[in-house]
Amino acid sequence: EEIGRLRRENAALKAEVAALRAGQQQQAPPVAAPKPAGVGAAQVHRAPVVVQADDLRATVERMLSAAGSDDAEAQAVASNLVLSNLKGHDSHGVGYLPRYIRGAKEGLIALNAKAAVVAETPTTVLLDGGVGFGQCLGKQAMGLGIPKALEQGVAVVGMRNSHHLARIGAWAEQCADAALAKTNVAERQRQQSAAAVTSHPSADAARPKDSG
């Protein structure tokens, strides 16, 4: 008797579903909204959002501070990201911020980390970044290498265990500002999932001699 009741209920449900489907098929298809005269589907797009750089930088700083970065780190990372956008490198701009915040929450980025010297000679220095923000570690690395190059004529700086080093051109510019030339030899970058050899991003810089 119970089995018979369940069968009858199942049959009734199937009938209701069939009736609903039949009603949907009988409904008229939706009417597409008219396109602007003379504009194709591929040409319809939203206007770009324009944000003042200072306002964007301040917003990014607040987000990083909320994630746990100290003032110096938040300012360094925010400035680097916004400057990347201003220089036309949107791939390394503020679009990276969600990945950074997620990495910080998951323990994949060590907030407020400082590079530690592993080995050093008059012309070389090897640093361990402790998986900190590359924006801070890269600047620190150049800050150690530039004085060596100025004194010895050449310097080689190595960095291991860094998170994303951000726009590599920033470090070339730092060298050029010190009247030095800079080039990359190789880069091995720690991704959020595991260490991996990247496509070897590189940035070279040289400052021309002053005229006269």
Image (tube, rainbow, N blue to C red):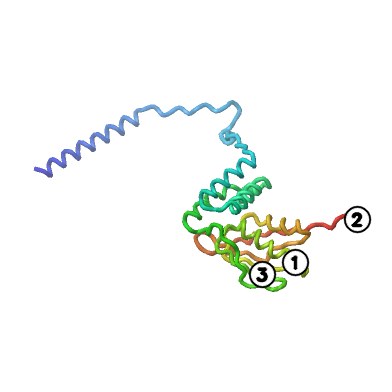
Res 8 label: none
- Residue under the image location 16 percent in, 41 percent down: 7
Residue designated by label 1: 149
Residue designated by label 3: 125
Query: Which residue extends farthest left?
Result: 1
The answer to whether mark 1 and mark 3 are in CB contact below 8 A is: no
Where residue 117 sits: x, y (%)? Answer: 62, 69
> Is residue 87 in view from this perspective?
yes
Looking at the rendered structure, the secondary structure element under dot 3 is: strand
Mark 2, mark 3: which one is toward the viewer? 3
Find residue 73 and report its image quarter. bottom right
Tell me how far mark 1 sits from mark 2, CA to CA: 24 Å
Residue designated by label 2: 212
Q: Quadrant of the C terminus?
A: bottom right
The answer to whether mark 2 and mark 3 are in CB contact below 8 A is: no
Give whichever of 41, 60 is nearer the camera: 60
- Residue under the image location 58 percent in, 51 percent down: 71
Tell me how far mark 1 sits from mark 3, CA to CA: 11 Å
Looking at the rendered structure, the kind of residue marked 1 is Ala
Which of the two labelled residues, at mark 2 and mark 3, occupies the earlier sequence position?
A: 3
Which of the two labelled residues, at mark 1 and mark 2, occupies the earlier sequence position?
A: 1
> Is residue 91 in view from this perspective?
no
Q: Is residue 60 above or below residue 151?
A: above
Mark count? 3
- Residue under the image location 23 percent in, 38 percent down: 14
Q: Is residue 38 left or right of residue 98?
A: right
Tell me how far mark 2 sits from mark 3, CA to CA: 35 Å
Looking at the rendered structure, the secondary structure element under dot 1 is: helix
Where residue 127 sits: x, y (%)? Answer: 62, 67
